[in-house]
Amino acid sequence: IPLLEKLFPNCKTDALAFSKFCTNYSTIERCLIDFITKFHGVYCFVLLYKKELYIFKDRHGVRPLALGIKCNDNNNITSFCVSSETVTFNILNYKYFRDIIPGELTKINKNGMNKLYQVTNNSLPCLFEYIYFLNPNSTFDNIKAENFRNNIGILLAKNESIHFDYDDTIV
């Protein structure tokens, strides 16, 4: 994170710079909320701190981040899975639960899941996620990557103005 590097030039890792950033706060929650409001870059974090998992995402939602759940026979949630690819949930036998919303901070601990903060956001997902990066079976912002690719192909084909002369076409 370039801004962290400017604030803490002697830190060799983002984790170390992030920990130095948080030293001036009374709680980790306050630090993370301040981080989300001050840092306007592109990031998705999953942070384990004192047996609690914190999940947060930049305010623009450029990259995907989703929650999966596993339930027992009584339909009670028994575990969570966090992934940038929703297809991961199928592989690990989790059920897609929801996307982490841009600017959201959520905590998961032994008592369950709790959304701690949500900054006013302006969702700007990255087209390259849909076109190149995501597994075709993954979903991001309620759009399946394969469907997005097919729909873009149809739109491009409709705008194409090439006409073939079938008499001169070699197949």
Image: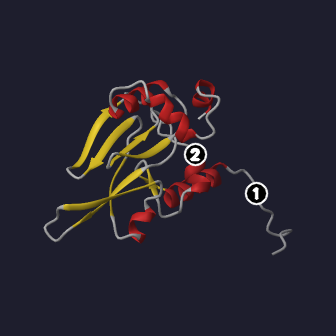
Q: Residue at x 19, y 68 (%)?
A: 72
Query: Are dots 2 and 1 in contact, CB under 8 Å?
Result: no
**Which corner quadrant of the image does residue 28 belong to?**
top left
Q: Residue at x 47, y 24 (%)?
A: 38
Determine the residue located farthest toward the bottom in the rendered image: 171
> Of helix, strand and loop, which one carries label 2?
helix
Report whether residue 135 is seen: yes
Which is more N-terminal, label 1 or label 2? Answer: 2
Q: Position of residue 54 (x, y in %)?
A: 36, 44
What residue sits right under mark 1 in the picture? 163
Q: Would you identify the image quadrant in which residue 26 lies?
A: top left
**116 left or right, relative to 129:** left
Q: Amino acid at mark 1?
A: His
The image quadrant of residue 23 is top left
Disc ID at residue 127 = 2
For label 2, the crowd category at 10 Å Cα-Cα, with few meaning under 14, some 14 to 19 and many 20 or more, is: few
SS at mark 1? Answer: loop
Residue 144 to residue 92: above or below: above
In this rendering, position of residue 154 left or right of residue 44 = right
> Is residue 101 depicted above or below 146 in this figure?
above
Relative image position of residue 19 (x, y in whole percent):
48, 35
Instruction: Tell me the number on the disc at residue 72.
Output: none
Which quadrant: the N terminus?
top right
Residue 142, image x, y percentages:
40, 51
Quadrant where the C terminus is found in the figure = bottom right
- Circle 1: is it few (<14), some (14-19), or many (20+) Cα within 10 Å? few
Task: Please state if 3 lies on the left or on the right of 139 as rendered.
Answer: right
Name the foreground residue: 33 vs 42: 33
Question: Taking 30 as reference, is 127 above or below it?
Answer: below
Can residue 42 be spotted in the picture?
Answer: no
**Amino acid found under the numbered disc labelled 2:** Leu
Between the C-alphas of marks 2 and 1, the distance is: 29 Å
